Amino acid sequence: MKPSICLIEDDPIMGEALVERFDIEGYGCDWLRRGRDALQPLRNKDYALVVSDIRLPDISGEQLYAELLAAGQPLPPFLFITGHGAIDQAVRLLKLGAEDYLSKPLDIPVLMGKVRDLCARAAPPAHSFRQLGISRAMRSIEAMLPRVAANARTVLITGESGVGKEVVARALHDVASAGKTQPFVAVNCGAISETLMEAELFGHEKGAFTGAVSQRRGCFEQADGGTLLLDEIGDMSLAMQVKLLRAIQERSIMRVGGEKPIPVDIRLICATNRDLKKMVETGGFREDLYYRIHVVQIDVPPLRERQEDILWLAERFLAELSNGGVVRRLDAGAKTALLTAPWPGNVRELRHCLERACVLSAAPEFSANDLFGVNDGGVSRVAARTLADHVAASERCHIVEALAGNDGRIAETAAQLGISRKNLWEKMKKYDI
């Protein structure tokens, strides 16, 4: 079910334009021209977001928001539109708990970025896959998956080694399968020799080559009706790329030693940590295959660029590593060290770091030393900072930890920290959270 937006706007030209844009982006929209007309729908309907002008013909957006707050009911996020003369009202609304405001004339790409972010944050966990993270980047990826699953049969996932490309691929498969039992087959193209790659992907007939003592279905056939992930596709040889292109174009394969094509119905996901476009320019990757698999690209950012996810992931990894026993905890120093580490190995390195600590330490609470050792990781970097840098890093760490504990919910986090939502919002802007 697509997220629904309540639009409160009396300008017919702007209202029509926004309704059309929301529809293109995949959102449902109820358009109301007067503030009081929105009171009943907001009480009775579950909206993901309210986009409201502050100046309305009957009551102001501020009055409307105040009345709804006074009623004590749970409210969706409010995003206000304001003219330059009403900035003071918009600031008051932020203090009351509104999420954000935009000034006229509207910058539509900026508006849609905020709409996608707020709708993703407000959305309940309606899918069978686990949340990918609480950072804006991962929530944006999570929000786009239903659209990609419904409209794309070929997807390219890019990102550094260890960022979680296969996790995103499995999440996309889970959304696409919608609770049905469908196969998910993953192949690491960099781990299979060139001589065996064709048989691995397309299968072989009995007697096709020495050692082929029986017929074997390849990965394409095994994934029929579901999803095939070709990981590290940039490592595939040019000769094999030709055969893969033909299989993608014709949606059928030929077993090694076979004589008739076999149709396959798959969702193909390709993943790589290499720059395929540069490889095309240097002749290392076929241009026609690049454009065939580059229909939809999902880029997974490195862990150092989405620090909000670090403690969120750490908690989940520690729960998994407990094996049903006592879940280990992290002390303040360990959390700071995790947040300041560069993580060249990304999520995979984070998990290995915690797994190593679980093996080597029996302590119920890990310190930075348990995770990195005395002269390693974030410990030395924290010690080398000025006092001002250390205070700022500690405050940012505390805010990120609180956001992780509240799954990114602003109101609950602000209440836990003992500050206003506006103050939290300002600190998040300051620290680029």
Image (cartoon, helix red, strand yellow):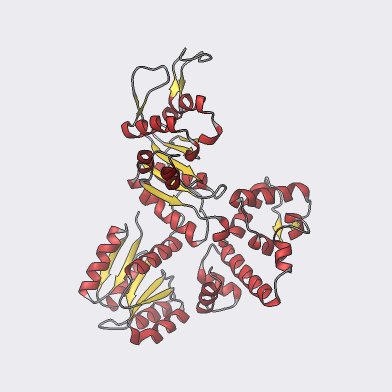
Residue 67 figure quarter: bottom left
Residue at 71 percent of width and 48 percent of height: 325
**Nearest to the observer: residue 2 or residue 295:** 295
Taking the image as shown, residue 64 lies to the left or right of residue 416, namely: left
Taking the image as shown, residue 7 lies to the left or right of residue 123, namely: left
**Nearest to the observer: residue 306 or residue 120:** 306
| In the image, residue 177 above or below residue 11 | above
| In the image, residue 240 above or below residue 378 | above
Residue 339 figure quarter: bottom right
Residue at 49 percent of width and 44 percent of height: 272
Taking the image as shown, residue 205 lies to the left or right of residue 11, namely: right
| In the image, residue 202 above or below residue 285 | above
The x, y position of residue 124, in whole percent, is 45, 58
Q: Is residue 141 visible?
A: yes
**Nearest to the observer: residue 360 or residue 200:** 200
- Quarter of the figure that contains the N terminus: bottom left
**Nearest to the observer: residue 278 or residue 340:** 278
Q: Is residue 367 visible?
A: no
The x, y position of residue 262, in whole percent, is 35, 24
| In the image, residue 261 above or below residue 110 | above
- Quarter of the figure that contains the C terminus: bottom right
Q: Residue furthest front?
A: 282
Residue 288 figure quarter: top left
The x, y position of residue 7, in whole percent, is 30, 70
